[in-house]
Amino acid sequence: SYRKILSKAKKKALVKAWLKDRYPVFKRNFATSAKELEQLITTCQRRGYYPVLFELPRNTAVIGSALNAPTAMYRAKCRALAKKHGVPYVSFVATAKLPNSSFYDLWHLVEPGRKVWQKLLSAKTAALLKRYGYDGGS
């Protein structure tokens, strides 16, 4: 709930902690995770599904440029896999323009940010369903 979001100071501390504790793990596991993601894409396609690579929201108002390096790695790999396998890569992070007040922490939305994100997600989901022939028979 927006009534219980973390303070900006606590959120900034989370950024520092992520860089110190999680970023080394991210880098160490990145190649393996990317291979697993590619296997998931190919398994889904082999089973007749239509995978979509989707970037989750993040609190850019607090994060700023602190996570540019890992975000760039992640996005580049996802875009490359999407292109290689002909699947969509979807990101609303820039489009949504969510302020700090839309996040509980760095990643989890609260209202009204959740409503903004859900509207974007619903519209994109409907477009993709139509693209793949699942538009309710219209």
Image (tube, rainbow, N blue to C red):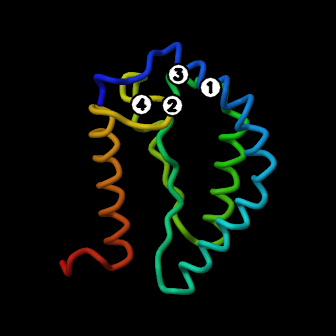
Q: Which residue is mark 1?
A: 15
Q: At 18% from the left edge and 78% from the top edge, which residue is drawn?
A: 138
Tag 4 secondary structure: loop
In 3D space, how far apart are the residues under numbered discs 4 and 3 (Cα atoms)?
Answer: 18 Å
Tag 1 secondary structure: helix
Q: Nearer the viewer, residue 111 or 71?
A: 111
Image quadrant for the N terminus?
top left
In 3D space, how far apart are the residues under numbered discs 1 and 2 (Cα atoms)?
Answer: 8 Å
Instruction: Answer whether labels 1 and 4 touch (C-beta < 8 Å).
Output: no
Residue 96 position in % (x across, y down): 39, 36
Q: Vertically, is 98 above or below 121?
A: above
Instruction: Answer whether labels 2 and 3 touch (C-beta < 8 Å).
Output: yes
Q: Identity of the amino acid at label 1? A: Val
Q: At 30% from the left edge and 77% from the top edge, which residue is drawn?
A: 134
Between circles 4 and 3, the one closer to the viewer is: 3
Name the N-terminal-most of marks 1 and 4.
Answer: 1
Q: Residue 72 is drawn in which quadrant?
A: top right
Dot 3 crowding, Cα within 10 Å, few <14, some 14–19, many 20+:
many
Q: Vertically, is 127 above or below 95?
A: below
Q: Which residue is mark 2?
A: 106
Residue 102 position in % (x across, y down): 36, 28
